[in-house]
């Protein structure tokens, strides 16, 4: 499990805890953690896509693709 998924789960846990305790600060922290985790997941996927495209281009230019 990567850090983004851990942060997303922690954020969800904080939101649930907020529903039980009524602590709005925890709710906001939970939402913020989940949003940050989602951004990191998307950024990670974008980086992977760029890396894969670069590798394919390298293969084509070297005559292996």
Image (cartoon, grey):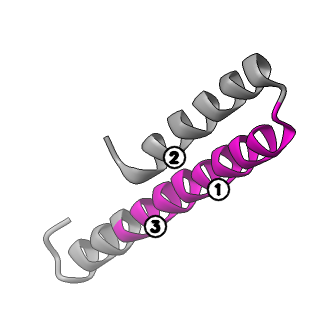
Q: Which mark is residue 7?
A: 2
Residue 48 in which image quadrant: bottom left
Answer with left or right where residue 12 lies relative to residue 4: right
Q: Which residues are magenta?
A: 23-51
The answer for how far apart the CA atoms under marks 3 and 1 are is: 16 Å
The residue under label 3 is 47
Q: Which mark, by number, is residue 36?
A: 1
In this view, the residue in front, 55 or 22, is 22
**In the rendering, at what x and y percent does residue 5 appear?**
46, 41
Q: Is residue 28 left or right of residue 42?
A: right
Q: Does 15 sit above or below residue 36?
A: above
Label 2 to label 3: alpha-carbon separation:
20 Å
- The reply to whether dot 2 and dot 1 touch (C-beta < 8 Å) is yes
Q: Residues within 10 Å of mark 2 (few under 14, many from 20)?
A: some
Q: Mark 3 vs mark 1: which is more N-terminal?
A: 1
Numbered disc in front, either 2 or 3 = 2
Residue 32 or residue 4, whichever sits in front: 32
Disc 2 to disc 3: CB gap under 8 Å: no
Q: Quadrant of the C terminus?
A: bottom left
Residue 61: x and y in percent read 26, 82
Residue drawn 70% across the image and 49% down it:
35
Query: Compared to 58, does 6 lie above or below?
Result: above
């Amino acid at each position: 499990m990567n850090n983004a998924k851990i942060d997303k789960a922690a954020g969800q846990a904080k939101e649930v805890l907020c529903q039980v305790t009524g602590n709005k600060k925890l709710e906001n922290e939970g939402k913020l953690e989940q949003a940050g985790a989602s951004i990191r997941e998307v950024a990670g996927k974008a980086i992977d896509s760029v890396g894969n495209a670069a590798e394919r281009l390298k293969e084509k230019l070297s005559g292996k693709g």
